[in-house]
Amino acid sequence: MSDAAPVADQIQALRKTIEHHNELYYNQDAPEISDLEYDELMRRLIQLETEYPEYLTPDSPSQRVGGQPLAGFESVRHRVPLLSLANAYSPEELRAFDERVKKALGEAETLRYVAELKIDGLTVALTYQDGQLLRAATRGDGEVGEDVTANVRTIRSIPLRLPKRPLTLGARGEIYIRKADFEALNAGRDPEERFANPRNAAAGSLRQLNPQVTAGRPLDAFFYDILYVESEAPKSQWDGFGLLRECGLTTNPAAKLCADIEEVIDFCRYWEEHRTELPYEIDGIVVKVNSLTDQARLGSTAKAPRSKIAFKFPAEQVETRVLQIAVNVGRTGAVTPLAFLEPVRVAGSTVSRATLHNEDNVRDKDIRVGDRVIIQKAGDVIPEIVRSLPEKRDGSERIFEMPKSCPECGAGLYRESGEAVVRCINSACPAHLREGIIHFASRDAMDIQGLGEAIVIQLIAAGLVRDVADLYRLQVEDLVGLERFGAKSAQNLIEAITASKQNQLSRLIFALGIRHVGEGAARELAAHFGTLENLGQADEAELTAIPMIGPKIAASVVKYFQETHNRELVAKLTALGLNTVEAGQEQETAQVLAGKTVVVTGTLETFSRSEIEELIRKQGGKAAGSVSKNTALLVVGKDPGSKYQKARELGIPILDEAGFKQVLAGAAELPSANPPEHG
Ligand SMILES: NC(=O)c1ccc[n+]([C@@H]2O[C@H](COP(=O)([O-])OP(=O)(O)OC[C@H]3O[C@@H](n4cnc5c(N)ncnc54)[C@H](O)[C@@H]3O)[C@@H](O)[C@H]2O)c1
Ligand SMILES: [Zn+2]
């Protein structure tokens, strides 16, 4: 079994990568890679897990749906789990699906399929009680989603009360933004705040903590599944559309009832060719067994129903020419090559630039200035160069050389071993400063409206801002003299900057731009440490004990706070009156778990894992993933794991679920340490 280790490592690495992209896609609504690249990673993982089932674990991303619900929203447990869909990429895979269905159902003569457009938006589940809209939720992880009722109520096409009969039912649909509305929405935003594609725009608009923001966004919805209904249940997918329409819920007019899989395949082909004519984006066709009895008989895996499959369109590819390759210096000093292209239309928009990621990518794909290339755009996200066409060269093409020094400050560039990225590590580099401030002010960070790229460049050029703390020293008088600023706009910007002082701690942590610390990690860190000061004192062990924080993030946080100028910056920000305390941590007095680290093992009866972790946090404690000598308490459910043994060896206090509830309720004291067990 000598090759076992590399496989395990490969699986582990794939899972990490996929988790990273899940976080970006589901929680931050800001994917870095195309869906097709993501699907490719997932396919590799599933393939390895199928070949080596001994490594398959229930927490693998291949076994789970979607992302975690965000902390800012109330959680909603779905009455019926909202599953994902298995994918097919070719007619052959659709025929294989048809075979599986027939085999499982045993030659049902009446087998028919419904083929529907796969709208590229995000799932919403509506609950109507006696005809009233009671709740709207996102899919979340399929079991628990986010309560977005207040936001969904702002969508005009969704009835607040059912027009005909006061039914109690659950309906699943897709929230989306039309392409034209997406363009208009983006045009009105600062370039660095633009959404990558309509799907992200829809997700970002729906998952707003302030429903007024959602109300201003052009959201719409199509409904496609009845999750349950307390009377008059339809017998088929097709009949379900009738009921949905009767309820005033919009269904997509393109859906088609097909006699067999060949008709489905024709439908897929038709829409693959005509998709760009639709006013909204679709990324495939969803195929569903029509009879709901058959759907129930086929059942589902952990992740997806066996009666449905998503046919995904291939990415659209076109040929163009590389006019120039330039480099761009980012916030972390990463110097990345960027190709300027002869503009072409692809997947519904004009493309004139493509990211080249890094030097190795340019070399591996042998992309030269002047080359004819194939570019691809997967419905949406940033286009990329798939390959060059060396057979079309005429000898005038030039090989791209990565510059040896920073194009912005002239400092030597530096490549860490094991990294593909080259960096300018001169902390005085104007690019760092500029990109750092732009990030600090951006929507998901401190959200300082009006402080976009152009203004940042101006402030730096005028010598008014040398670090982000200087922003908080700006006066109206400093600005009025500058180009673009009138008395009113200067006043507005100062107000926006001042208002940002009150932001949640998690925003500030994210805004500092600590490497590898994304929004999700920032929220975790804020929730666990409560204050910026505590965070600054944390060591790697403390950090990695937090479930979502891996060694890479932990090391980066520690390194950040070790650097003197970072500590000075944090001190300046604090002195200038920025909020450095997580809301709720200050006032709550009688927190029974204040400062204590609690570990949970085994299955609990009354709480899900995330619920109990939430409770622990609310009581001032930290929920950790592994037992160490710093653990204050182990809560043990059914079938505890090795943590139980370890806790006993270390003499950590142990409580069962009932005992823990008593502590939470204040009816019992937290037990003190047991004598360690040996052997
Ligand atoms: N680019 C990235 O970094 C990244 C990261 C994570 C996920 N993703 C993408 O998300 C996909 C996984 O997400 P998923 O679980 O939502 O699966 P999915 O997108 O493959 O399919 C399920 C979804 O399709 C939608 N849908 C639209 N029209 C529908 C219809 N008529 N009937 C039923 N469903 C319909 C629903 O929202 C449903 O949840 C991946 O395949 C990948 O493409 C991308
Ligand atoms: Zn530089």
Image (tube, rainbow, N blue to C red):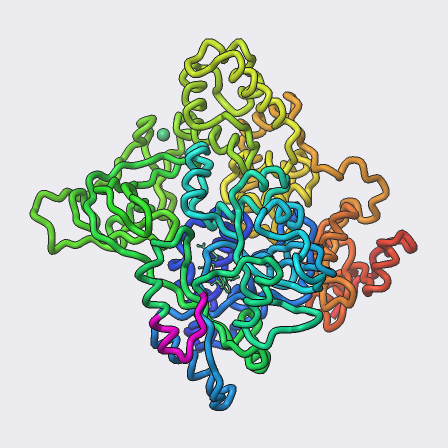
Magenta range is: 255-266
Whether residue 645 is visible here, answered yes or no, is: no
Q: Where, quadrant-wise, is the C terminus in this rendering?
A: bottom right
Q: Where, quadrant-wise, is the N terminus in this rendering?
A: bottom left
**Residue at point 43%, 19% (across, down):** 460
Residue at the extreme right: 667
Which residue is more in the foreground, 511 or 36?
36
Residue 258: in magenta span: yes
**Residue 382, above or below 262:** above
Left-right relation of 363 to 152: left
Residue at the extreme front: 164
**Residue at point 57%, 40% (across, down):** 558
**Residue at point 60%, 67% (across, down):** 243
Task: Tell me residue 285's x, y (percent).
Answer: 42, 65
Task: Tell me residue 412's x, y (percent).
Answer: 32, 32
Task: Tell me residue 283's x, y (percent).
Answer: 41, 59
Whether residue 300 is visible here, answered yes or no, is: yes
Left-right relation of 106 to 651: left
Dividing the image into four equal quarters, which quarter contains ligand 2? top left
**Residue 637, above or below 101:** above
Q: Quadrant of residue 588?
A: top right
Which residue is more in the foreground, 326 or 525?
326
